Amino acid sequence: MVEVRLRAVRVDLQSNTPVLLLQETEGLGRTLPIFIGAPEATAIAFALQGMDTPRPMTHDLIRDLLESLDADVERVVVTELRASTYFADIVLRHEGEEVPVSSRPSDAVAVAVRTGAPLYVADDLMDAEGIMLAVDEEEEDEDDSEGEETEEAGNPEVIVGEFRSFLDTIRPEDFSS
C-alpha cells in the first residue's frame, strides 16, 4: 500500500465534475485522480472546513455510529479500479479485530477526513493509474514553507468557492446516464 494525502478536491474544467486528488506522501509524488459526485465533494469540503451543521450529515452520522459502537477507523484503502469504477475499503477496528467494509472512495475519504484516519492506495492501482501533476514554482514555494497550508492542499475557502462555481453550472441532465 502507498500512503497518500488528500491533496485537493477540484472541479475538472472539461467535464465540470468534482475530482478527488490523492497524492503519495513519499516516493514519486504520484497523484490518483478520482471523479466523485457533487454531494460527496460537498461533504468532504465541509469536513475540511470544520463546518458544523444543525443536524449530522451522513458522514458525520457514520462517524458517530462507529464511535457509539466502539469501532475505530484504522485506515481507508482505495483498492481497485474495475469497469471504470473505483473501489475502497474502510478498515475498522472493533473488539480487537480488523473489519474491512466496502465503500465508494468518496464516502471513505469523507469518513477518513472526519475521523483522522490515514489514506492509502493499493500499490498496483497507483502504478497503473497514478499520474504526475505539474507543479508551478509558486506552489512549490508554498509547499516548502513549513506549517502553511497551500491552495492545492485543500484550502477550504478555495474548495468551497470552486464547488459553488460547479453548482452554478450543473444541470439535472448532467447526472443522467
Image (cartoon, rainbow, N blue to C red):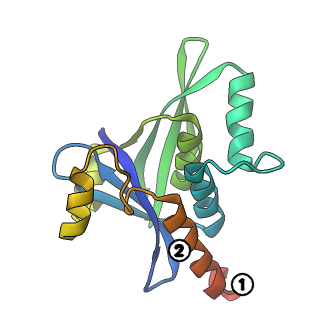
Tell me: residue 75, above or below residue 35: above
Look at discs 1 and 2 and give the one toward the viewer: 2
Q: CA distance from mark 1 to mark 2?
A: 19 Å
> Quick check: can you spot residue 141?
yes
Q: Residue at x 21, y 59 (%)?
A: 141
**Outermost residue toward the right?**
55
Q: Position of residue 99 (x, y in %)?
A: 55, 26
Considering the numbered disc 1 on the image, is that residue within a helix, a strand or a loop? helix
Q: Quadrant of residue 152?
A: bottom left
**Outermost residue toward the top?**
96
Q: Residue at x 31, y 53 (%)?
A: 23
Q: Position of residue 48 (x, y in %)?
A: 55, 51
Amino acid type of the residue that numbered disc 2 sits on in the rendered structure:
Glu
Q: Earlier in the sequence, mark 1 or mark 2?
A: 2
Left-right relation of 163 to 138? right
From the image, tell me which residue sits under label 2.
162
Left-right relation of 145 to 68? left
Q: Position of residue 127 (x, y in %)?
A: 22, 54
Left-right relation of 170 to 118? right
> Quick check: can you spot residue 107?
no
Amino acid type of the residue that numbered disc 1 sits on in the rendered structure:
Pro
Tell me: residue 102, above or below residue 29: above
Q: Residue at x 65, y 84 (%)?
A: 168
Residue 172's label in the rendered image is 1
Q: Residue at x 64, y 79 (%)?
A: 167
Tell me: residue 114, above or below residue 67: below
